[in-house]
Amino acid sequence: MNPRPPFPPFTEETARQKVQAAEDAWNSRDPERVALAYTEDTHWRNRAEFVNGRAQVVEFLRRKWHRELDYRLKKELWAFNGHRIAVRFEYEFHDDSGQWFRSYGNENWEFDDLGYMKFRYASINDLPIKETDRKLRWERKI
């Protein structure tokens, strides 16, 4: 595997870079692109689901973005130390009936020495919202 900078141990600057890279990748809604940030044997807990290995990450993300339409995510660095980063996040999506949701949560990440995420533990809560109450919208980049 090719190194994936920035590498641990993290500074505030490099932790913020990892968080932004994760936000950008997840907002691409490309399961294969997202999966490349994780070790081959990565372990996840996402709500009550356990995901092991890149192949399961890709399948999980395909299912997720098939249900969670027009997904938009914002991540914020919460804390960091050594090989670990904690993130607060929120994202919005709608289901196939048109009901919008805002999901809030926290993630705990641990990285290997090459900069790949080995562990991802996510706690997430969903809140039904009206479309007019959305906060996260796609921004045009110039």
Image (tube, grey):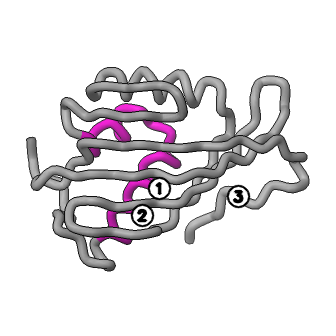
Give the left or right position of residue 71, taking residue 50 as reference. right
On the image, numbered disc 1 is attached to which residue? 23
Label 2 to label 3, Cα distance in Å?
16 Å
Which of the marked residues, 3 or 1, is nearer the chain's N terminus?
1
Is mark 2 in CB contact (under 8 Å) with mark 3?
Answer: no
On the image, numbered disc 2 is attached to which residue? 20
Label 2 to label 1, Cα distance in Å?
5 Å
What type is the residue that disc 1 sits on? Glu
What type is the residue that disc 2 sits on? Gln
Which of the marked residues, 2 or 3, is nearer the chain's N terminus?
2
Residue at the image point whose x is 22% and y is 52% from the top:
111
Label 3 to label 1, Cα distance in Å?
13 Å
Instruction: Say above or below: 141 vs 110.
Output: below
Q: Nearer the viewer, residue 81 or 73?
A: 81
Give the left or right position of residue 107, taking residue 139 as reference. left
Q: Nearer the viewer, residue 55 or 123?
A: 123
**Residue stretch rendered in magenta on the structure:** 15-38
Residue 103 at x, y percent in the picture: 67, 46
Is mark 2 in CB contact (under 8 Å) with mark 1?
Answer: yes
Is mark 3 in CB contact (under 8 Å) with mark 1?
Answer: no
Dot 2: within a 10 Å radius of its alpha carbon, few (fewer than 14), some, or many (20 or more) residues? some
Circle 1: element type: helix
Give the left or right position of residue 18, taking residue 45 as reference. left
Dot 3: within a 10 Å radius of its alpha carbon, few (fewer than 14), some, or many (20 or more) residues? some
Residue 106 numbered mark, or none: none
On the image, numbered disc 3 is attached to which residue? 136
